[in-house]
């Protein structure tokens, strides 16, 4: 009997304030979508870090006729200087730390450059003579790149030694900033959702003030009176969380797996299972927020 009464009150409250309920659902949906996006973006960043950092190479750029860095003085590296570099890489000091390495001459570098920038006008401005010959080194442990830097930097014919992870760090810093922005926007939206839930519950209570007065007169407890209002907030927030969950699944399924994975086959991407894994958190966040906001709002109203 009590359960039936509570459920009737819940749906009566939802129908009386339908426009406000829709607003709660939409605000909760948008805010939780931002929360889920931030979580999935961070998961994508972590996957890419693990994938690319393990494959990051150390590049030993040799001097060209146009080099002014290091000790080059606009003089290309000689054959003997390149032999010295290769002997260092094969030495007992460095060999245990190197998984593999290969040498890329100017023609190979130019061919790779043309392939990489095939649709750019910059291809017409570059000739093989402008590109450095390079030793590309894959390490057993990419975090030990400092050993290569110390061993080869400053040798005759070497323009510079560059760890590709330094470029990746800059990219991931931008991605982390985007993730932090999504979290900040989500936090603001969640605050707005909480305020909207509290306002809606208060309006719902005010519209039923006579019923509440009668319930008090017949001895109904505050908890019995509060329960329908808290459930109203939970229902609205759960609907918003459900929409946010579907939106995130759709984004990963259609955009990430359907578009990005085809456009960038060399990159590892998150799966729909990652989106599904975030759904319980979205529901817990939305429902928890609704319970707190609704309870505080109706409690304050009853005390007034």
Image (cartoon, grey):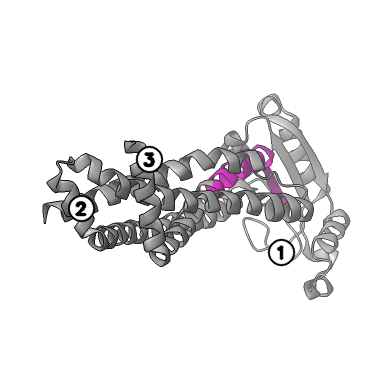
Start-end of magenta stretch: 40-61
- The quadrant of the image that shows the N terminus is top left
Say whether residue 118 is left or right of residue 43: right
Say whether residue 211 is left or right of residue 165: left
Provide the secondary structure element on which disc 1 rests.
loop
In this view, the mark in front (1 or 3)? 3
Return the x and y of residue 21 as percentages of the image width and height. 41, 60
**Magenta span has 47?**
yes
Give me the residue at 76% from left, 47% from top.
266
Q: Quadrant of residue 27?
A: bottom left
Q: Which residue is mark 2?
A: 212
Question: Which label number is shown at residue 4?
Answer: 3
Q: Which residue is mark 1?
A: 74
Q: Please determine whether, in this image, residue 81 is positioned above or below residue 92.
A: below
Instruction: For label 1, count other residues whose C-alpha is less than 10 Å away and answer few (under 14), some (14-19) or many (20+).
Output: few
- Residues under labels 2 and 1: Cα distance? 89 Å
Residue 157 at least partly seen: no
In this view, the mark in front (2 or 1)? 2
Q: Nearer the viewer, residue 188 or 64?
A: 188
Predominant SS of the magenta segment: helix
Q: Nearer the viewer, residue 246 or 110?
A: 246
Lower sequence index among marks 2 and 1: 1
Return the x and y of residue 108 as percentages of the image width and height. 87, 54
Q: Please determine whether, in this image, residue 31 is positioned above or below residue 276.
A: below
Lower sequence index among marks 1 and 3: 3
């Amino acid at each position: 009997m009590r359960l039936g009464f509570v459920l009737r009150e819940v749906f009566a409250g939802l129908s009386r304030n339908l426009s406000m309920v829709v607003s709660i659902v939409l605000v909760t949906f948008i805010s939780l979508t931002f929360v889920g996006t931030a979580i999935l973006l961070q998961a994508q960043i972590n996957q890419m870090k693990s994938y690319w950092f393990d494959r990051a190479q150390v590049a030993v750029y040799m001097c060209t006729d146009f080099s002014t860095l290091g000790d080059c003085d606009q003089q290309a590296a000689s054959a003997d200087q390149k032999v010295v570099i290769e002997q260092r890489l094969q030495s007992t000091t460095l060999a245990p730390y190197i998984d593999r390495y290969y040498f890329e001459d100017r023609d190979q570098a130019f061919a790779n450059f043309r392939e990489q920038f095939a649709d750019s006008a910059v291809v017409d401005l570059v000739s093989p003579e402008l590109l450095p010959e390079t030793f590309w080194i894959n390490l057993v442990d990419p975090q030990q790149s400092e050993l290569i830097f110390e061993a080869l930097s400053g040798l005759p014919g070497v323009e510079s030694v560059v760890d590709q992870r330094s470029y990746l760090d800059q990219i991931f810093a931008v991605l982390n900033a985007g993730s932090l922005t999504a979290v900040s926007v989500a936090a603001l939206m969640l605050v707005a959702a909480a305020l909207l839930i509290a306002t809606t519950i208060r309006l719902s209570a005010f519209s039923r003030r006579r019923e509440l007065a009668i319930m008090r007169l017949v001895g109904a407890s505050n908890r019995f009176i509060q329960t329908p209002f808290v459930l109203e907030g939970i229902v609205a927030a759960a609907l918003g969380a459900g929409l946010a969950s579907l939106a995130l699944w759709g984004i990963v399924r259609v955009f990430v797996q359907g578009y990005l994975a085809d456009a960038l086959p060399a990159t590892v991407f998150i799966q729909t299972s990652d989106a599904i894994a975030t759904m319980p958190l979205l529901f817990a966040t939305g429902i928890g927020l609704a319970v707190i906001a609704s309870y505080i709002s109706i409690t304050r109203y009853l005390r007034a």
